[in-house]
Image (cartoon, grey):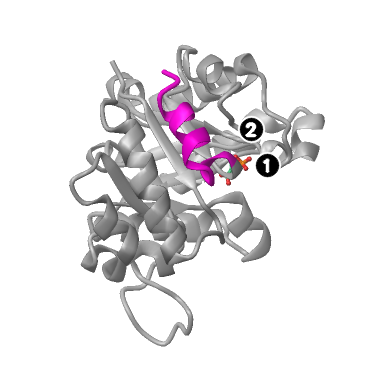
Amino acid sequence: MRRKVIAGNWKMNMLPNEAIKFIEELSAQVKNTSNEIILCIPYTDLFYGLLTAQNTNIKIGAQNMHWEEKGAYTGEVSGQMLKSIGVEYVIIGHSERRQYFAETDETVNKKIKSALQNELKPIVCVGESLEQRETGNQEEVVKNQIKLALEGITKEDLSKIIIAYEPIWAIGTGKTATSNDANEMIKTIRNEVLSLYNEETAQKLIILYGGSVKSENSKELFSTSDIDGGLVGGASLKPDEFAKICLSV
Ligand code: PEP
């Protein structure tokens, strides 16, 4: 059976003192769960977050990285740099990065490869826009994103990757996909992985749902056959609310 994973994405929120307080409060509430709990936090919080999360069951991730190891890329942070301070996870290809920072399927693929080389575990985001859903193209769009993201990735490396299906129209809008629709799309992703790799690899892959997850809907979403947990934005900014989500399954 696949483990449940709940990952928070703080986006551009939380100063170091707030991050420390949050992790202290959250860790006390989730210490007995066997669900995997990850917080993807701003670069400026990483060091403090890692120290505070030591000896807890909370894992720390970043929200982006560059694919090159080092060089003249002003303002960027590499996988090697993240690894050097003990970061374990990194979100790659979040729709906000695709939308505002020109992230493409090609750069997503390069970043995944660089993350794996640096022994970071990528949380790879895919998902369709409202227009793509309204025109009935959502499955093709997401299958294509998966195919391009995973180009050249071995099945051994795929076991270190988490996929997050995040329909863009559901992110930060309060509109959640129904548990049935989200589960169906995640089954489609699993089938695509089956056709690219094999049955065992597809069955083992952790696939999360993201898009306005909150404590009122998390149990229903996470109890479906194929949704293995959530990538949570807004509702990951309050420790009590996020703890409820982490403990809902
Ligand atoms: C996200 O940022 O990945 C996300 C899903 O945000 P929200 O939960 O706020 O919709």
Tag 1: Cα neighbours inside 10 Å, few (<14), some, or many (≥20)?
A: many
Amino acid marked by disc 2? Glu
The residue most toward the bottom is 72
* Relative image position of residue 35 (x, y in whole percent): 32, 27
Residue 66 seen by the camera: no
Ligand 1, seen in the image, is in the quarter at top right
Q: Which mark is residue 168?
A: 1
**Tag of residue 140:** 2
Mark 2: secondary structure = helix
**Residue 246 among magenta residues:** yes
Residue at x-position 68% and y-position 28%: 176
Residue 59 in percent (x, y) is at 30, 46
Q: Which mark is residue 177?
A: none
Report the mark closest to the observer, 2 or 1: 1
- Magenta span: predominant SS is helix
Mark 1: amino acid: Ile
Of 106 and 58, which appears nearest the observer?
58
Nearer-the-camera pick, 17 or 112: 17
Q: Quadrant of residue 123?
A: top left
Dot 1: element: helix
Q: Which residues are magenta?
A: 235-249
Name the residue: 59% across, 37% down.
Answer: 166
State the residue at coordinates (18%, 46%): 55
Q: Is residue 15 left or right of residue 131?
A: left
Q: Is residue 8 magenta?
A: no
Quick one: label 2 or label 1, which is nearer the N terminus?
2
